[in-house]
Amino acid sequence: MKIDLGRLFDLIAGDPQADRAVPPTGFTARLTLFTAGSMAFLAVFAMALSLATGRLADRWSAELARTSTLRISAPADQADAQLRAAITVLETTPGVAAARPLTKDEQRALLAPWFGPDLPIEDLPIPQLIEIIEEGDGYDPTGLRARLQAEVPGAVLDDHSRWRKPLVAAANRLRALGWLAIILIASSTGAMITLAAQAALAANAQVIRVMRLVGARDIYIAGAFVRRFTLRALTGAAIGTLAGMFAIWLLPSTDVAGGFLTGLGFQGLHWLWPLTIPPLAATVAFAATRAAALRTLKEQS
Amino acid sequence: MIEFENVAYSYGGAELFSQVSLTLAAGSFHFLTGPSGAGKTTLLKLCYGALQATAGNVHLFGDDAATMDRDAVALSRRRIGVVHQDCQFLDHLSVTDNIALPLTVSGRDAEAVGNLDDLIGWVGLRGQAAQLPPQLSGGERQRAALARAVIMSPDVIVADEPTGNVDWEMSQRLLTLLIELNRMGKTVIIATHDMNLIRTAKSQVSTRVLRLKDRRLMQAGVEL
């Protein structure tokens, strides 16, 4: 349905006389306020999830795309020689900005989650890891693998693509699910408000009969209901949005606790995004109530 | 104003009346009588577009009612004042607001505030203007309904049993108001069982008495 913004603004400006013709209906008023508030609260979280996973996808994509790892598994007597050969190959490879062997402490830290902090790494045949930092358009992984195979037989190049792709795909999928949740929330809001509007129209059948008797056009009668439901949805959504933003603000920050879940908030200008929810809810209510009212009035004629 | 050509109306497969031809000319005064269930209210509803004829043609101010959309019907109702037996008010609005409702829905409330006060005085409801409809007596409700019916200065006034719930004195008062309106040039059609009301009216104004009986519309025993 096409939304007439001019009509929406006229509606919010209001016609007190028309509004008074329809008696206040407590039940549908409370239902609309509650629905709009709850849905707006959920929409804030869906929006936060979507924006956070978007940031995550961008970060993973950027960070993992710029680094890769070379793993050298060689007999103890050849380890140093293969490490030096690998560094030489990497330093002469176009697209590689730096290549740095991880220290024993760094390797111990990587294994700590599985084996604890006191792992005697010096006594174990742990492969040596080399961190590769890329520059420009990056290196040619196929060419590098071929050179390594010839010069460093124990080297295995991991360009992170097999980790990065599913992670980025998962993050993008989560972002899409977040937006889908917002669309579903908007649709559910529309459906609930449609039901509430239909209940109000049915409860006011006598009012509609009288207004028709005195020459009211359908659009006038519908307007009295539409204005009421639009303003209720706007009010409820504003309350729900502010509550949702406050709840998000109360979440622990990344700096305090670290980790994925603590990043589920808004950052910077993203705090402005939830403010679009109340006018969107009002627009959904306007469209839903107008369609329901005009359909009901047509059926009742 | 309003014209019927061989109009029939059926409901649920049963024919209520048929072959009804009728012209409500400007400034005319009609009574519509007939036994209960003969279709008087239905015929009046056809006059103001609340129902569609199942056969024949109804013309409202020259337009074929069958082809009018709902907006056109609504606009034509602003030229027809309707008084129902049960009045049909919005019970949460004051008497003044109910009488002004036709002005409100047509966006003409501001220009007619002075006329509204005069009209409330004309029907003798100044003292009840701020009350709610359920607080009014039967006669007061009928007078308020009449005031609402005429506030737009309609061309036609359709009254369905306007004296059905009031005493003799009040029915004479309502009739006087309707005759006054007719003398102002309004077309009036009243459905009623009250033969005394008809006799009183005939002594004061030129009237035409129509009777719905046996699915036909008659005038003085002659089928129309």
Image (cartoon, coloured by chain):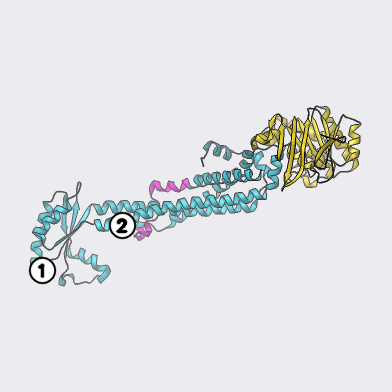
Please state which amino acid type lies under the numbered disc 1.
Pro
Task: State the residue in front, A293 or B72.
Answer: B72
> Within 10 angstroms of label 1, few (less than 14), some, or many (20 or more) residues?
few
> Within 10 angstroms of label 2, few (less than 14), some, or many (20 or more) residues?
some
Chain coloured cyan in this rendering = A
Q: Quadrant of residue B178?
A: top right
According to the picture, the residue beneath numbered tag 1 turns out to be A75
In percent of the image, x 87 and y 39: which residue is there?
A: B171
Report the chain holding disc 1: A
Q: Quadrant of residue A230?
A: top right
Task: State the residue in front, A274 or B81.
Answer: B81
Residue B98 image point, x, y percent: 74, 40
Report the chain holding disc 2: A
Please state which amino acid type lies under the numbered disc 2.
Leu
Task: State the residue in front, A30 or B14.
Answer: B14
Q: Is residue A274 magenta?
A: yes
Q: Which mark is residue A167?
A: 2
Q: Is residue A169 magenta?
A: no
Q: CA distance from mark 1 to mark 2?
A: 34 Å
Of callouts 1 and 2, the N-terminal one:
1
Q: Is residue A267 left or right of residue A127?
A: right
Residue A88 image point, x, y percent: 9, 55
Chain B takes which shade in the image?
yellow
Q: Is residue B189 left or right of residue A42?
A: right
Q: Which residues are magenta?
A: A255-276
